[in-house]
Image (spheres, grey):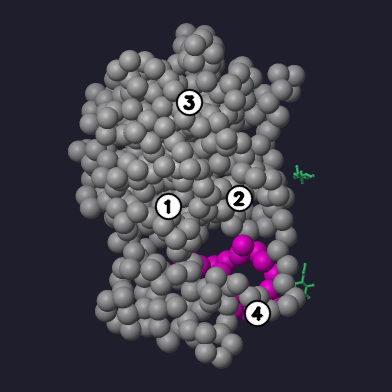
Amino acid sequence: MLQALLLTAGAAAAYSLPNSNGAPPLAQKCGPSSSKIVCMHKYASVMPYHFYREPSNGKDPGSGNFASTNVSDPSFAQVADADIIVYDEAAFKILGDKPSVKKMFEIEKKGHEAPVYVPSMGKIFFGEPAAPAPLHQFVIDLNKEPPTLKPYTFDPPIYAPNGATISKGKLYWAQSGGSKNLEGGHLEARPGIVAADPKTGKSETILNNFYGYYFNQINDLVVDSKGDIWFTDPQYAWFSNLSDTPPRLQPSTYRFRPSTGAVSIVDDTCRQPNGIAISADEKTMYIADSGSVNGDVSDSVQAMSGTTFNGTTVGRTIYAYDILKGKFLANKRPIYVAQDWIPDGIKVATNGYLVTGAGLGVDVIDPEEGTVVMRIQTDYPVQNLAFAGKDRKQLWMVGVGGVTRVNWELEGVKLE
Ligand SMILES: *[C@@H]1O[C@H](CO)[C@@H](O)[C@H](O)[C@H]1NC(C)=O
Ligand SMILES: *[C@@H]1O[C@H](CO)[C@@H](O)[C@H](O)[C@H]1NC(C)=O
Ligand SMILES: *[C@@H]1O[C@H](CO)[C@@H](O)[C@H](O)[C@H]1NC(C)=O
């Protein structure tokens, strides 16, 4: 179709969105030819009648997604097939001349989370927090071409980590599951935070309770420059059979100071707080509320009752908060609502953009404008992501059944 219009050799800046002369199609091929990219005309904000989008079936993150919208404009069919959907011209700057989206590994069709890049080793670790969760994690070696994937077990093992980050050479894992009977009763683990040395594999639990209560499901975390750890505690472990005990605490976000052991609440207004990210200047915190995916927390309901997505309820929103005195969160404001499914992990780029897993792909968000700049699509649900590579210009996306690498010009904030 109308591809030539935007194809100018050379600098990425030469690309632009379709203009509004005439009656442009909703979707057009655009940008560098290294990927299947489509540009949406003005966010498809006016669709020709008749159009209709089915709601999600509540179970499958891909069902009823934006690409499945039934529109009479035939150009829209390209959306389902695209690797990248561009909404805003700013996307061309971050895509560069040769963006690529490549599925690197097919993995088990279960949840995968907590990818963390260790620059000094050139390796990415990630976990499988989905029942029955193994006691090993995985490691991708980027020093090999093509990169390799292997299981990896820490000592002692870490159970069902759902989030991870690195600070001063140490890994911090959000252990999301709780069980008295791991390894045939030889090992007990509770939702908490586990610090680990990626070089020796030695791990150490640094938090496992709130005044004696088990946490519900520590989901994701960030470490600030003072060493305080901010983490979310939603309730998914119970519905997904990763916990032998129903939730005891309201879904909340906390700040933990390892040097004193103090845990302080910083937010209790999200239905299910999930991904968390801190801006590079440490002035803003971002929390994804994924409460549109929810389950029954009552003690009487058996574990593994599962979850359902309901798009008409609040809970597929990323909120920004001001960080006050380096300790508290204030001025909560919504900056993004997922077009598909719910926002999961969030990571921050050096230009301030956010990348979040949402349904079959990730959205790139300009938080200063509250707009989605572009989307990358996958054929499996993306749950969490990490910037990696020497220049941190690779994005690695893990989820239910796959690991995908994106090469582009968007650079992740340095974590090491
Ligand atoms: C989808 O669009 C076609 C063509 O406009 C129409 O015939 C069909 O009824 C639509 N289906 C739904 C579910 O809206
Ligand atoms: C939940 O997990 C327990 C222990 O890991 C297992 O015995 C049980 O069969 C699981 N329940 C379901 C419904 O999968
Ligand atoms: C979604 O939630 C709304 C509001 O709570 C409720 O009325 C509706 O029945 C729910 N839909 C489904 C499919 O569960």
Is residue 158 rendered to the left or right of residue 9?
right
**Residue at the spot 41% in from the left edge and 27% down from the top edge:** 255
In percent of width and height, residue 121 lies at 22, 38
Q: Residue furthest bottom?
A: 22
Which amino acid does the dot numbered 1 rest on? Answer: Val
Pick the front one: 386 or 185: 386
Is residue 178 rendered to the left or right of residue 114?
right
Q: Which mark is residue 265?
A: 3
Q: Earlier in the sequence, mark 3 or mark 4?
A: 4
Which amino acid does the dot numbered 4 rest on? Answer: Asp
Q: Earlier in the sequence, mark 1 or mark 2?
A: 2
Q: Residues within 10 Å of mark 2 (few under 14, many from 20)?
A: many
Q: Quadrant of ligand 1?
A: bottom right
Q: Is residue 177 visible?
A: yes
Q: Residues within 10 Å of mark 4 (few under 14, many from 20)?
A: some
Q: Which residue is mark 4?
A: 73
Query: What residue span does the magenta drawing correspond to?
Result: 66-84
Q: How far is disc 4 from disc 2 in space, using C-alphas? A: 24 Å
Q: Are marks 4 and 1 in contact (CB under 8 Å)?
A: no
Q: Earlier in the sequence, mark 3 or mark 2?
A: 3
**Residue at the spot 45% in from the left edge and 42% down from the top edge:** 321
Q: Nearer the viewer, mark 3 or mark 1?
A: 3
Q: Which residue is mark 2?
A: 341
Vertical order, 76 against 323 (above or below):
below
**Picture quadrant where residue 222 is located:** top left
Q: How far is disc 3 from disc 2 in space, using C-alphas? A: 27 Å
In percent of width and height, residue 156 lies at 36, 16
Q: Which residue is mark 1?
A: 355
Q: Are marks 3 and 2 in contact (CB under 8 Å)?
A: no
